[in-house]
Image: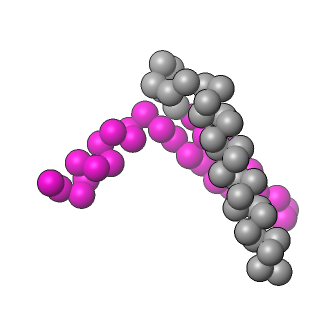
Amino acid sequence: MDLMDDFAHFQSLTITMVSYMGKLRIAVGTEKGYIDPPKFKSSIENALEMILKAAHETV
């Protein structure tokens, strides 16, 4: 199986990250009907909380 075949399933997901004036902005979007919105939002929020917690523990 080609490596790119693994990513073919994620074509309907977009992630944009911008750092400006000391703030990180992250925008995540999916194709309509591709993912359950409340479940997706919850999983993204949980992931970002874990990243933030890990970052604070290393400081």
- Name which residue lies at 32% across and 48% down: 7
| Location of residue 59 (image quadrant) | bottom right
At 75% across and 54% down in the image, what residue appears? Answer: 49
Residue 4, position in %: x, y?
A: 25, 53
Q: Please tell me whether residue 22 is drawn above or below residue 46 in the rendered image.
A: below
Residue 2: image quadrant is bottom left
Whether residue 37 sits left or right of residue 55 in the image: it is left
Residue closer to the observer: 25 or 52: 52
Q: Say above or below: 26 vs 35.
A: below
Judged left or right of residue 22, residue 1 is left
Whether residue 29 is visible here, answered yes or no, is yes
Q: What's drawn in magenta, residue-wise? A: 1-29
Where 33 falls versus 3 (above or below)?
Answer: above
Q: Nearer the viewer, residue 38 or 9?
A: 38
Observer able to see residue 20: no
Q: Is residue 4 magenta?
A: yes
Relative side of 12 to 41, left or right: left
Where residue 30 sits in the image (x, y, percent)?
A: 52, 31
Say which quadrant the N terminus sits in: bottom left
* Residue 48 appears left or right of 6: right
Query: Was residue 56 drawn as part of the magenta stretch in this picture?
Result: no
Picture residue at 77% right of the left edge, 79% below the top: 58
Residue at horizontal 28 percent and vertical 50 percent from the top = 6
